Image (spheres, rainbow, N blue to C red):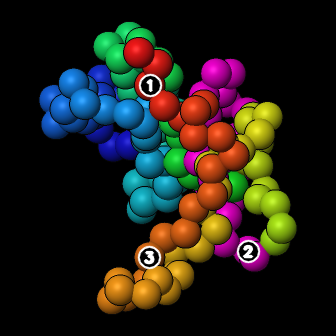
């Protein structure tokens, strides 16, 4: 968030092979030491710029990956989320994830970052999608 949203979007897209992409682009919006109450409005403005630039260039809004605690603390209702799909990181172990303020529902849920799978050394992320079709680029 300490850098221009347009510059971040340009960097992101120049490093993305858009000729063979299936999943909509994802912006990871989470806490860093940069996020403070003093920087909050600037960070939200830069995130809006990044979302808008990616939508203009790709023809779709990116997916937002975030946690409810971070989003509710630093973003809340100050960003228009209509048409943005939510990939929520909620590791509380509940039967449904907490949906951050401003979002109507979740589309993908990261339930854990510490799952074990046979054949993989070390922990892996565990995600559930409600509908993969809603997360895919349309031809």
Please say if 78 is above or below 32. above
* Residue at mark 3: 124
Query: In which quarter of the view is residue 124 placed?
Result: bottom left
Say above or below: 40 vs 50: below
* Front position in the image: 122 or 76: 122
Secondary structure under tag 1 reads loop
Residue that lies at the very extreme toward the front in this rendered image = 119
Q: Is residue 50 left or right of residue 37?
A: left
Give the crowd class for mark 2: few <14, some 14-19, many >=20 residues within 10 Å: few
Residue 44: x and y in percent read 52, 33
Closest to the observer, 82 or 115: 115
Looking at the image, is mark 1 or mark 2 nearer the viewer? 1
In the rendered structure, which disc, 1 or 2, sits on the residue that comes first in sequence? 2
What secondary structure is marked by label 2? loop
Q: In the rendering, which numbered label is found on residue 137?
A: 1
In screen coordinates, is 13 left or right of 35? left
**Mark 3 or 2 closer to N-term?**
2
Q: Residues within 10 Å of mark 3 (few under 14, many from 20)?
A: few
In front of the other: 105 or 5: 105
Residue 104: image x %, image y %? Answer: 79, 34
- The part of the chain drawn in magenta is 69-93
Quadrant position of the N terminus in the picture: top left
* 3D distance between C-alphas at marks 1 and 2: 30 Å
Describe residue 94's horizontal placement relative to residue 16 as left or right: right
- As for residue 74 lying within the magenta part, the answer is yes
Magenta-drawn stretch, dominant element (helix, strand or loop): loop
Secondary structure beneath dot 3 equals strand
Residue at 30% x, 23% y: name it.
6
Where in the figure is residue 3, as x and y percent of width and height?
29, 38
Give the numbered dot on residue 92: 2
């Amino acid at each position: 968030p300490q850098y221009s949203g347009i510059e971040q979007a340009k960097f992101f897209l120049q490093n993305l092979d858009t000729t063979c992409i299936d999943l909509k682009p994802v912006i990871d919006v989470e806490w860093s030491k940069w996020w403070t109450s003093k920087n909050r409005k600037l960070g939200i403005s830069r995130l809006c710029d990044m979302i808008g630039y990616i939508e203009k260039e790709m023809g779709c809004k990116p997916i937002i990956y975030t946690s409810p605690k971070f989003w509710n603390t630093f973003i809340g209702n100050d960003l228009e989320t209509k048409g943005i799909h939510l990939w929520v990181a909620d590791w509380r172990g509940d039967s449904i994830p907490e949906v951050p303020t401003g979002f109507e529902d979740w589309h993908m849920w990261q339930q854990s970052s510490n799952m074990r799978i046979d054949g993989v050394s070390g922990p892996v992320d565990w995600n559930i999608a409600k509908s993969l079709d809603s997360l895919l680029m349309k031809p």
